[in-house]
Image: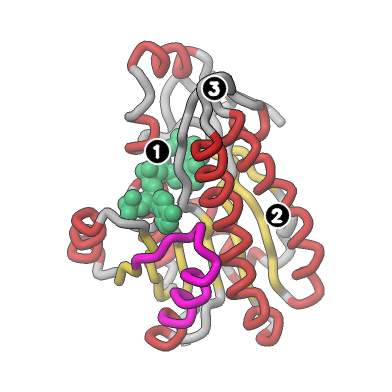
């Protein structure tokens, strides 16, 4: 029977490319999203992949969402924790809500999803969890103490959970993308983006499918010896 994957934030941007790459690898994919019903419906029509709405920052919603996917598609073998938001501002301008939303969704979402699927993966002695971190969690970024803290936390979370999963065939890895051409980056002011691209040695933004390719590798049967790693995919911008 085909493996089943949940890709959080799987209906657009990097997540859409990941959903498609896993589908192409013969995996049955459930794409989660937060609230953009229009984009989710268009995604399902385009790809044939079913979309499921819940907030990854909500612990109970993740448990219920995973239960629904398992009832409809079968036990979840793979989770890609890709859902993420930015709420940028220097610390002087950052409100407590901006801090808490980013930590709750970006980092808390990884915990909530892993907590929902880990027992089943452990019992079945096979699982793949891939967490999408960021170059800004490795290097820091002006105006992003919330995002950098959450993404840096994801990298630590990955290494700790990898140790818990290793004996049970459950691998846990992270990918740290650099700047990828998605809606999230389109929100960055043009002058700031030009300065960012000037610092990328390959001279361009990354493409979502370049991240998806690596996720598919980590989720493959042959990926079983790769665990606790963080793969940087950033055009040489930060060599970690
Ligand atoms: N783009 C980059 O340059 C870049 C670089 C490094 C890391 N990353 C990371 O890569 C991931 C994907 O980024 P992206 O640029 O593809 O983002 P994006 O285009 O803004 O898409 C974000 C996706 O996450 C979903 N989402 C947001 N909050 C959610 C929540 N609370 N619960 C469930 N789903 C939620 C969105 O759902 P809706 O459509 O319903 O809003 C959407 O599907 C993020 O974790 C981001 O931090 C991106």
Q: CA distance from mark 2 to mark 3?
A: 25 Å
Instruction: Kindly identify which numbered label has been placed on residue 207.
Output: 1
Image coords of residue 72 (percent x, y): 38, 86
Q: Residues within 10 Å of mark 1 (few under 14, many from 20)?
A: some
Which mark, residue 67? none
Front disc: 2 or 3: 3
Disc 1 vs disc 3: Cβ atoms closer than 8 Å? no
Compared with residue 184, is residue 10 higher up or lower down, i.e. above or below?
A: below
Q: Nearer the viewer, residue 142 or 198?
A: 142
Which quarter of the rendered picture does the C terminus lie within? top right
The picture quadrant where one finds residue 190 is top left
Q: Secondary structure at mark 2?
A: helix
Pointer 2: residues within 10 angstroms few (<14), some, or many (20+)?
many
> What is the count of numbered marks?
3
**Mark 3 Cα shell of 10 Å, populated few (<14), some (14-19), many (≥20):** some
Region in magenta: 53-68
Q: Nearer the viewer, mark 1 or mark 3?
A: 3
* 153 relative position to 221: left or right: right
Extreme residue toward the front, this view: 96
Determine the main secondary structure of the stretch shown in magenta: helix
Give the mark nearest the N terminus, 2 or 3.
3
Residues at marks 2 and 1, CA–CA distance in whole angstroms: 24 Å
Marked residue nearer the N-terminal end (2 or 1): 2
Say which residue label 2 marks.
Answer: 158
- x and y percent of residue 237 in the render? 58, 23
Which quadrant would residue 218 be assigned to in this image? bottom right
Tell me the SS state at disc 1: loop
Q: Is residue 44 left or right of residue 172?
A: left
């Amino acid at each position: 029977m085909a493996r089943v994957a949940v890709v959080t934030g799987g209906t657009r941007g990097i997540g859409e490319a990941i959903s498609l790459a896993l589908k192409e690898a013969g995996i049955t994919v459930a794409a989660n999203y937060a609230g953009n019903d229009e984009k989710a419906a268009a995604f399902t029509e385009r790809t044939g992949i079913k979309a499921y709405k819940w907030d990854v920052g909500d612990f109970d919603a993740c448990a219920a969402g995973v239960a629904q996917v398992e009832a409809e598609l079968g036990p979840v073998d793979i989770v890609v924790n890709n859902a993420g938001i930015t709420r940028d501002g220097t610390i002087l301008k950052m409100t407590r809500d901006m801090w808490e939303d980013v930590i709750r969704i970006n980092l808390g979402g990884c915990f909530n999803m892993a907590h929902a699927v880990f027992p089943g993966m452990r019992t079945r002695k096979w699982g793949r969890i891939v967490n999408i971190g960021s170059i800004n969690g490795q290097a820091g970024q002006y105006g992003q103490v919330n995002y950098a803290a959450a993404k840096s936390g994801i990298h630590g979370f990955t290494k700790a959970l990898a140790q818990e999963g290793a004996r049970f065939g459950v691998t846990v890895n992270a990918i740290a993308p650099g700047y990828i051409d998605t809606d999230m980056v389109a929100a960055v002011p043009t002058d700031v983006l030009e300065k960012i691209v000037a610092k990328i040695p390959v001279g361009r933004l990354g493409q979502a499918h370049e991240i998806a390719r690596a996720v598919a590798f980590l989720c493959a049967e042959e990926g079983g010896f790769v665990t606790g790693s963080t793969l940087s995919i950033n055009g040489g911008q930060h060599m970690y």
